[in-house]
Image (tube, rainbow, N blue to C red):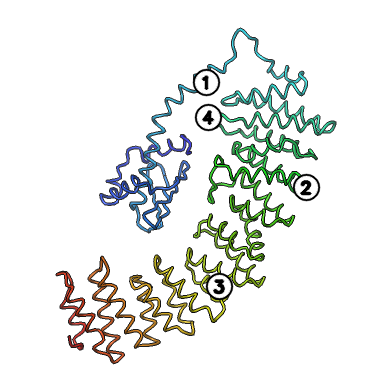
Amino acid sequence: MIDERVLLAWRDAIGTLSTLAWAGARNSTVGGQLLRDGWVGRLRCDSDAAQCAVSQGDHGELVAITRKGAALTTDCSCGVPRCAHAVAVVLELQKRLRRAQTTSDDRGSVLANLRERLRPSPATPPPPRALRDLQRLPVDAAVDMLALAWRQALRPTPSDVAELEIAVALVRAAVSANPEQAAVWALRLLDGLGAPKVVFTPLSESAQVQLEKICAILGVCEQPLQLEALFVHATDGQPQIAPAVAVILAQWAARDSPACDKLTSLAQGWVESPRHPAWREHAQPGGADLLLSALIDSLCAGGHLDQALRLAQSWPPLRSTLLPLMAAAGHAGNFEAIRQILARLDPRGATFAEAATAAWQAAQTADQPETALAMALWVLERLPAASWYQRARQACPPQRWSAVRHNWLAAVLAHDEVTWLPGALADETDAAQALFAVVHLGPLRDQTATAALVALGRYDAQLAVAAHQLRLLALCSSATPTDKAIVRAADDLCQIATTAGQPLAGAPYLRLVIGNHTGRLPLAKLLRACTEMPI
């Protein structure tokens, strides 16, 4: 949920913006269709910048929009300024802005009614909340009064913060005499600060200082208390309170085994519950991230790797915990757990690459060749990169490599261009057959097939002729062939056939092209390209 104040900050830039004039008719039409079809992903937005992923079929683009006053600057991974993907994101922002403007007035009246209902009745005397009265109350009564006041306050005032400071001072003074009772009082204050509000209001800087003091009092307690209540604050509490509580629970889990077991049980139940928020890799780390990462660290240190992996599969930990965990799983040869954890990460992100590398290196070092090979091939299907190709080749036994490579080529060329592949295959002992397989399995991958044909011509001219024939046949059979591509492929076939001493090799394929002439194909240019070939 994006705060209304953030959306209203974009009012001058997008409130009256016409996407037709801003991006043109085509981009405006396509962008509107992308939004209506539901291809716009989760929007991350602050007052000056917005970021969103826009999918389109099997492909997706990352769009970043920056606001400087009333001017917008776009940056899309497709490389086109003010593209259709950017238009879709702008339209989504305009939709949310209209919704925020419509409901802002209604929310103001609702808040006014709530304040009126929470106002004490004139017939009952107000509680002794003046500072001079608060200092004379017993600590227990002062804590209860402050906790109730903060639960009821829609927007805490400076007076509320001043009274909180007095109550915290009273609790801190009791730590030396009775730390357990002081921790109980501190927990009551924490419950008051963390009570859910109708409208989220961030804590002021002075209130955050008091929050740190409350957490310090809880940390002094040697025996963990009310773990369930604190766990709720750490996982589902307010964003300013959850990280501080998570640090306290992590300290208790590190030094107390029963507390660690209890928190692990609570965490497992929480991640399996449909009520918890969805895990997101790029979100700002919160209390749940800090706590579950600390629990996974404690489980690994205690030798409970399987339990740590089960927890990590539901809620991947932070990078500092994830990398050692992946290394331990790779050393143990647990590829299934590694795969499920990495599947939650963005393959294009640095965390995915580092975690996968740590797992592969550990598996390779621990003499787990099957795990290392499965890891490399699984990553290659999601992130075709030359480094992972070399890792797969290194982990695979030489007698199996040809079959393994062929299966991977069939999978990756079905949906991706892999422009670096011909250069990597040139180092293989069976380079000619491997390059031919690239053209055979992906004849319509224009950049990859063209590079493979060029490299194949240097190794085996006879095999290159057959590969050119395959590509030309695939282009003629394609549902949407282009004249330029067909003419270029036919011209290349004529040249390589003449070089290989087979001037008639291209004749049947050229007859196929001419026989399927649509009236748009430049036949004169095609025939000039093969004057040495009798047809």
Q: What residue does disc 2 label?
A: 255
Q: Report, in whole angstroms, how far the alpha carbon at label 1 lies from the one at label 3.
A: 63 Å
What residue is shown at x 36% (from left), y 81% (from top)? 454
Amino acid type, callout 4: Val
- Label 2 or label 1, whichever lies nearer to me, is 2
Q: Is residue 446 left or right of residue 142?
A: left
Mark 1 residue element: helix
- Sequence-first tag of 2 and 3: 2
Q: Is residue 94 above or below residue 493?
A: above
Residue 391's tag is: 3
Q: What residue does disc 1 label?
A: 114
Q: Report, in whole angstroms, how far the alpha carbon at label 4 lies from the one at label 3.
A: 52 Å
- Sequence-first tag of 2 and 4: 4
- Sequence-first tag of 1 and 3: 1
Q: Label 1 neighbourhood size at 10 Å, few (<14), some (14-19), many (20+)? A: few
- Sequence-first tag of 1 and 4: 1
Mark 2 residue element: helix
Q: Is residue 166 left or right of residue 67?
A: right
Q: Nearer the viewer, residue 524 or 394?
A: 394
Which residue is farthest top? 123
What residue is shown at x 46% (from left), y 71% (from top)? 408
Q: What residue does disc 4 label?
A: 199
Mark 4 residue element: loop
Which x, y percent locates residue 362? 64, 67
Q: Report, in whole angstroms, how far the alpha carbon at label 1 lies from the one at label 4.
A: 11 Å
Q: Nearer the viewer, residue 169 or 98?
A: 98
Labels 2 and 3 touching (C-beta < 8 A): no
Amino acid type, callout 1: Leu
What residue is shown at x 62% (from left), y 44% (from top)? 288
Amino acid type, callout 2: Arg
